Amino acid sequence: MYIPKYYKITDFEEIREFVQHNSFGTLVTTQKGRPIATHVPLQLVKEGEDHYVTGHLAYGNPQWRTFETSEEVLVMFQGPQAYISSSWYEQENVPTWNYQAVHLYGAATILSEEELKQDLAGLLKKHEQHRDHPVLWETLSPALLEKELKGIVGFKIKVAEVQAAYKMSQNRTDTDYRTIVEQLQKEENPNSKQMAEAMEKKRKEL
């Protein structure tokens, strides 16, 4: 991913938090030289000193079979994105687009059944534990779980390289920055409002 220096993020804890909050990612591998992709919920977990992206695919999805032939796979995560009108700048310029994106590279391997069960339990806990009537691994019937496990393949990707870009008008003046945030908040597009919130948070951290 091309990342100008203004927008490059290197703090892994910040990247990890971003992935945790934007964990519906895109898994990319190659099949006979052609890129293929699946959009899938994922987790970023730590094992010892290493980090892994974990998830699962439908057994009928041929992509999991490419793990053996793909030296590396790519996982992409995206946050809010928004059009930025140059009419919001003090000086004449061209429009642009703000966004947040993280790319993780690594080798993928298939999870054992026990590892898959643990990963699914963690996924349910993450997305269900705050609900009034949470659907957790231990609350589902063994018969249902056994049936569903037969239809999926779990995987984990050992993270070998991290690329993160937050293009959020960091190169603009303070006046332009404040104006962009104010204008984004007025937009009807929810992505624009989310970008405004992300920009406000980022500016406080600088």
Image (cartoon, rainbow, N blue to C red):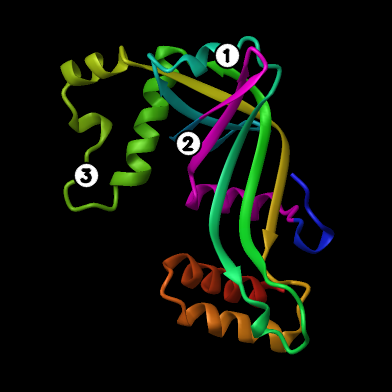
Q: Quadrant of the N terminus?
A: top right
Question: For the residues marked 1 and 3, what is the alpha-carbon distance in whole angstroms?
Answer: 35 Å
Considering only order in the chain, which callout, 2 or 1, is on the residue closer to the N terminus?
Answer: 2
Please report whichever mark, 1 or 3, sits nearer to the chain's N-terminal start: 1
Does label 2 or label 3 sit earlier along the sequence?
2
Q: Answer above or below: position of 156 versus 83.
A: above
Describe residue 44's horizontal placement relative to residue 132 as left or right: right
Residue at 66% of width from left, 16% of height from top? 70
Residue type at numbered disc 2: Leu
Give coordinates of residue 36: x percent, y percent. 56, 25
Identify the amino acid type marked 1: Thr
Q: Quadrant of residue 202?
A: bottom right
Q: Quote the CA–CA distance across marks 2 and 3.
A: 19 Å
Label 3 secondary element: loop
Mark 2 and mark 1 in contact (Cβ < 8 Å)?
no
Q: Which mark is residue 23?
A: none
What's the residue at 26%, 19% (across, down)? 148
Q: On the rendered structure, is 153 left or right of 65? A: left
Residue of label 2:
42
Span highlighted in magenta in the image: 9-37
Residue underneath mark 1: 66
* Tag 3: amino acid: Pro
Q: On the image, which quarter does residue 149 sit in?
A: top left
